[in-house]
Amino acid sequence: MSLIKANDIQNASGGIPTVKGQQLIPTAWVNFNGVGTVAIRDSEGISSITDSGTGDYTANFAVAMANTNYAASSNVEPTVSNGGSDTYISSLATASCRLNHFEVGTRRDGNPCNIIVIGGQ
């Protein structure tokens, strides 16, 4: 295995290289508490979470995506034991994406909730 050490890295045009521009790392991600008062624990590229009702959240991007051709994935820890759960991203917009969470066919809040977004810029 090799080790690379550097104080400064520049791309061919003299600017700072960006891995994000190559879409190799998430464009945005968030970990938040979706029970009670919704609160972001940690995030990158997410400015806020809108609680639109039980099990219904919107992650608002700090910087709008250039398009809606990005991929978003989510997961929520179930609160009902031995019950089936369904968590999915229901809409992709340039300014936000929306997460829905159901357990045993009923909308439920969850904790923790996570969303990862790749692409869109």
Image: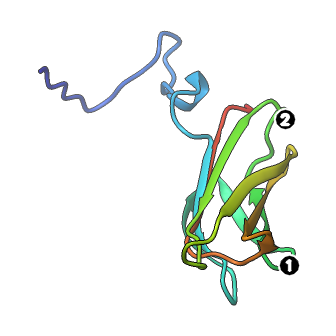
Residue for point 53% across, 12% down: 13
Nearest to the observer: residue 12 or residue 70? 70
Q: How was this image coloured?
A: rainbow
* Residue at x 51%, y 23% (from the top left corner): 15
Question: Residue at image x 74%, y 65%?
Answer: 101
Residue 120 at x, y percent in the picture? 74, 33
Q: Could you tell me the amino acid type at mark 1?
A: Gly
Residue lying farthest bottom? Answer: 36
Q: Residue furthest top?
A: 12
Query: Whole-percent x and y of residue 39?
Result: 63, 79
Residue 54 locus on image (x, y percent): 81, 79
Neighbourhood count class around disc 2 (C-alpha, 10 Å): few under 14, some 14–19, many 20 upward: some
Which x, y percent locates residue 49? Answer: 74, 69
Report the number of numbered marks. Answer: 2
Q: Amino acid at mark 2?
A: Thr
Foreground: disc 2 or disc 1: 1
Q: Tell me if residue 44 comes above or below residue 107 in the rendering.
A: above
Residue that badge 2 annotates: 68
Tell me the quarter of the image containing the N terminus: top left
Asked if 14 appears above or below 43 in the picture, the reply is: above
Q: Is residue 60 left or right of residue 114?
A: right
Q: Which quadrant of the figure contains the C terminus?
A: top right
| Residue that label 1 marks | 53
Q: Earlier in the sequence, mark 2 or mark 1?
A: 1
Report how far apart the C-alphas of labels 2 and 1 lie in the structure.
24 Å
Secondary structure under tag 1 reads loop
Label 2 residue SS: loop
Crowding at dot 1, Cα within 10 Å, few <14 / some 14-19 / many 20+, comes out as: few
User: Any mark on residue 6, and which?
Assistant: none
In the rendered view, does 70 fall on the left or right side of 112? right
Above or below for 10 versus 79: above
Vertical comparison of 44 with 54: above or below: above
